[in-house]
Image (spheres, rainbow, N blue to C red):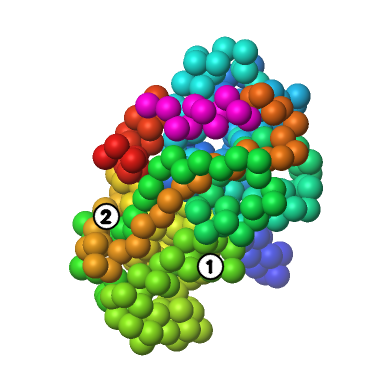
Amino acid sequence: MKYLQKITFAITAIIALGSQAKAQDHRFDPPWNTPPESKVQFTVPGVDNVPDLFGDINDPQLVVFFAGNQFMCIDDLMSAFKKQYPQYQRVFAETLPPGILAKQIMGGSIVIGNMRITLKPDVYTAGKSRIDQMPEYFSKTAPYAYNRLAIMVQKGNPQKVKGLKDLGRTDVRVSMPNPEWEGIGKRIEEAYVKAGGETLKKEIMDTKVKNGKTFLTQIHHRQTPMRIMYKQSDAAPVWFTEAYYQKMIGHPTDMVEIPDGENISATYVAGQLKTAPHAQAAQDFMDFLVSPTAKAIYKKYGFITKND
């Protein structure tokens, strides 16, 4: 009898484990970009996907650190750059949060999983405030694109979120960039104050963080869309272009626009590093970023350019 009980328990455990494995849902996991060509493609959703490292990490001719929320532009941007400057075919780019990239520049390396990267960037792009904090690193800076906030919600907006004030409701689960990690977090807090004063900011960033209704991300341009699509969060303040892109690629999200009076704007600035290992390539890429070709690519993905 005990033997049969053990067998029954074992079978039940196996079935339970199988159910858990089957329940794992990676339908919407990144990378959302098109991977480069290779004879071996080994991307495992949820395990080995590395969505924010792009291109040739070995012996690159140009290294660019992009503030992460520009990831959707990278395929078109690098393709156009290589076409316009055919002497550069080995390009490596990172699209991590700008604060993390700044620490990588200052510290000289980053570790992701078991991989250590010591490449020095030629060009770093981030919001204007971040660039302004580290002027000693750059030989040249230039603005090239602009953005504003929107709210990403689940398809059909089941919680009927109409604006930033609704993110203070107790029944709305919020995905929010952690201001300690990402510059957008501080800008969103500014928008909360515009929309509902310090009371709204405290409700979302203090009360709801403590009770678990606000989830603070470390890499919001990846975590936030996934939390919305996997129905772990109901709404998330994001850059307009992030909500725009998820709809562009057919993911089950919707967007709530924020009126100008409650919104904030962002200026993207590129900085050429004084220590750029590939100085001419850095100069050429800086010129490319402010060119009509690059502006058209940014506009395609919902960014605002100076000529808009």
Residue at horizontal 26%, vertical 55%?
255
The image quadrant of residue 196 is bottom left
Label 2 packing within 10 angstroms: few (<14), some (14-19), many (20+): many
Residue at horizontal 35%, vertical 78%?
193
- Residue 286 lies within the magenta run: yes
Q: Is residue 4 above or below residue 195?
A: above
Q: Nearer the viewer, residue 63 or 145?
A: 145
- Does the residue at mark 1 contact the one at mark 2 (Cβ under 8 Å)? no
Q: Is residue 126 above or below residue 154?
A: above
> Which residue position holds label 2?
255
Residue at horizontal 43%, vertical 51%?
267
Q: For the magenta stretch, what is the residue range?
A: 282-292
Separation of marks 1 and 2 at Cα, in angstroms: 21 Å
- Residue 262 lies within the magenta run: no
Q: Which x, y percent locates residue 35?
A: 54, 28
Q: Is residue 303 visible?
A: yes
Q: Which x, y percent locates residue 203?
A: 39, 84
Residue at horizontal 41%, vertical 42%?
145
Q: Quadrant of the C terminus?
A: top left
Disc 2 marks a residue whose amino acid type is: Met
* N-term mark: 1 or 2: 1
Disc 1 marks a residue whose amino acid type is: Asn
Q: Is residue 142 above or below residue 147?
A: above
Label 1 packing within 10 angstroms: few (<14), some (14-19), many (20+): some
> Which residue position holds label 1?
178
Tell me how many marks there are.
2
